[in-house]
Image (spheres, helix red, strand yellow):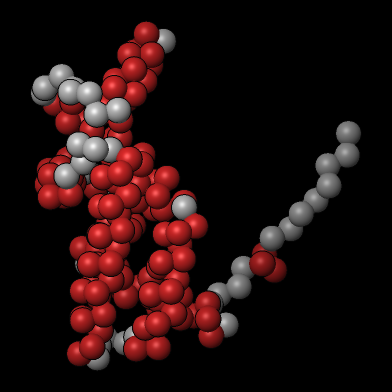
Amino acid sequence: MATTASSTASLDRASSGETLESGENATSLRFDLVISEMENILLDPAFRTLQDQFYEKYYHEFEDRDENKLICMDIFKEYVHLVENFLERRLSSALPWFNMPEFVGLCRNSVRPDSTDGDVFDIMASLADFNTFKEFILAYRKEQEGTALDFSDLILTTALHH
């Protein structure tokens, strides 16, 4: 229980901009704090609106095939720029000590393949990998065109009576 209280106090100090103790624990704490704040940002309707507006503008350029139009790479670069700037502004506002290049370095050095589940890492992958981005935008296209798989018939609800 003391460890949890100590960790919470450290997170509070870190988020308020106080200097953290040096070493691996401080790096890990900063990384965890950034990931936590990114989760909050990704849940914010402003982020979803930004992403949906971008997808809406460009989804028709993408097709589910191996060959890509030349414009697709330019669209990807625009997406990366847009999302990185949005995240960096929001993270810097919430965490005054935040530094995007430092965070990217932490991701490269700290993230283990078995610990990368979740929306934050999906978004980070879409910024680093064209094919991941393409999967996201193709899923959006399928939703817009009504060709996405519909699993609603597989859901069964049952009232429980005691």
Residue 52, position as x, y percentages in the image = 45, 71
Task: Return the residue found at the far right.
Answer: 162
Residue 25, position as x, y percentages in the image = 18, 24
Task: Return the residue found at the far top.
Answer: 2
Q: Residue at x 35, y 73 (%)?
A: 135
Side (left or right) of 87 relative to 54: left
Which of 103/139 is in front?
Answer: 103
Q: Residue at x 15, y 19 (%)?
A: 21
Is residue 47 placed above or below 64 in the rendered structure? above
Q: Is residue 117 visible?
A: no
Q: Quadrant of residue 92?
A: top left
Residue 3, position as x, y percentages in the image = 34, 13
Q: Quadrant of residue 32?
A: top left
Is residue 145 placed above or below 45 in the rendered structure? below
Q: Residue at x 31, y 58 (%)?
A: 86
Is residue 105 placed above or below 27 in the rendered structure? below
Q: Is residue 72 visible?
A: yes
Q: Residue at x 43, y 74 (%)?
A: 53
Residue 13, position as x, y percentages in the image = 29, 22
Side (left or right) of 110 relative to 43: left
